[in-house]
Structures are given as C-alpha cells and as structure tokens.
Image (spheres, helix red, strand yellow):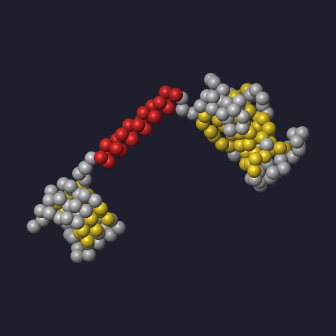
Amino acid sequence: MSGSALTELREGDEIPLRLQLWDGAVDKYVRAFMYADGTSMSGSPFELPHFAQGKYTYKDAALTYPTNIDEVCAIFIVYNNNTFTEESKCHERSLDIYRTGIDADIAGSIDEIKILITELITLVSNQSSSAEIVGLVDAEDLLIGSIFDDEILGLVTSDEIEGLVSEGDEIYGYISESDGIVGITGGFE
C-alpha cells in the first residue's frame, strides 16, 4: 500500500474523498472502501469519478464524519475496468485516515486564546514602550522610528539611526564617521 494522508475532521463534517494518480491516468476506475473504527461504512465502497488530470474525487454531503467514532479510513483501489474486477498493477492501493480533530471544548479554548493574543498584540502596538538595545549593532542594522528613554549600548558601526532621539536617551559606545544619525537629537553635550 502506498502512502497515506491524515485529515482531521469534526463530527458531521463532510468527508472529502480524493485520489491523485502519480501518472495522471484519466482512464481508470477508482473505489474507496470506507471503514469507521474498523467497521465497513454504509454505502461503501464509493466510486470516485475522474475529475481532471488523473485526479479522482467523490463529494456527497451525505458522506459525513459519524458521531462517536475515533477514526475513519478510506482504502483506495484503482481498477482498469468499470466492472471493478481487474485491479491496476501500475497503481498501488493507498490509504487516507480521517480523525476527529479538536473537540468543541478545546476549539473554544483555542478561539479564546486567539482573541487574547490579538488583544495583546493590539495593546503592545498601541503603547510607546522603552527598549534597550545592548550589544553590537552592525552594518546591516537600521534603526528607524522614535527612540524614547532608550539605551543603545555597544559598538555602533556603519549604521543609520533615523527618527526622534529624545534627551532621555543614552547612546554609549563608539559612533564612527560613516554612521548616519538622522533626525532630531536633543540633550547631548
């Protein structure tokens, strides 16, 4: 059996059946044998008609992930004839596994976490915060924006500092002639 795919679904989600043949063959007949926790599912096997360029699909709103089932699997078999009696020797069987994804409680928690992260990002971006830049600031660094009550410690070489540097800022270290300090500087003697 060739490779398998794992898809996470929730109870009641439509189960997508898709198989792409490696050689793009358009003249084959594909069936998916479906099992829910090891038991054959109602309606199985399902025939997957050719969609395009060797891709075979089956879509039916009635084929949904059953309740109280941990795992559904589809074993795809490719045939050379429409009577499904001659299995293709060029195409191995393949397996898709569908599992219940995140249950409702966990999904709700994830949604709450997303909201909190969004609020945190908004809070941080709306505040003018102090930052310390400590260490080597080298040629690739470009500091742009307002610098309030910040400290730049270390060697500053071939860098550009653009924006407002307020008088509470402290810049320590060596500033070479090739550094461009652009903007308003205040409080330096």
Q: Is residue 1 visible?
A: no
Q: Nearer the viewer, residue 137 or 148?
A: 148
Q: Residue at x 89, y 39 (%)?
A: 83
**Up-down: is 147 above or below 125?**
below
Image location (x, y in percent) of residue 131: 25, 53
Q: Is residue 13 visible?
A: yes
Q: How many numbered tags mark residues here?
A: 0
Q: Residue at x 23, y 69 (%)?
A: 181
Image location (x, y in percent) of residue 111: 45, 34
Residue 184 sits in quarter? bottom left
Q: Nearer the viewer, residue 126 or 116?
A: 126
Q: As drawn, which residue projects farthest toward the left?
A: 189
Q: Residue at x 74, y 28 (%)?
A: 41
119 displayed left or right of 151:
right
90 displayed left or right of 95:
right
Q: As drawn, which residue projects farthest toward the bottom?
A: 177
**Up-down: is 117 above or below 142?**
above
118 displayed left or right of 32:
left
Image location (x, y in percent) of residue 179: 26, 72
**Up-down: is 53 above or below 41?**
below
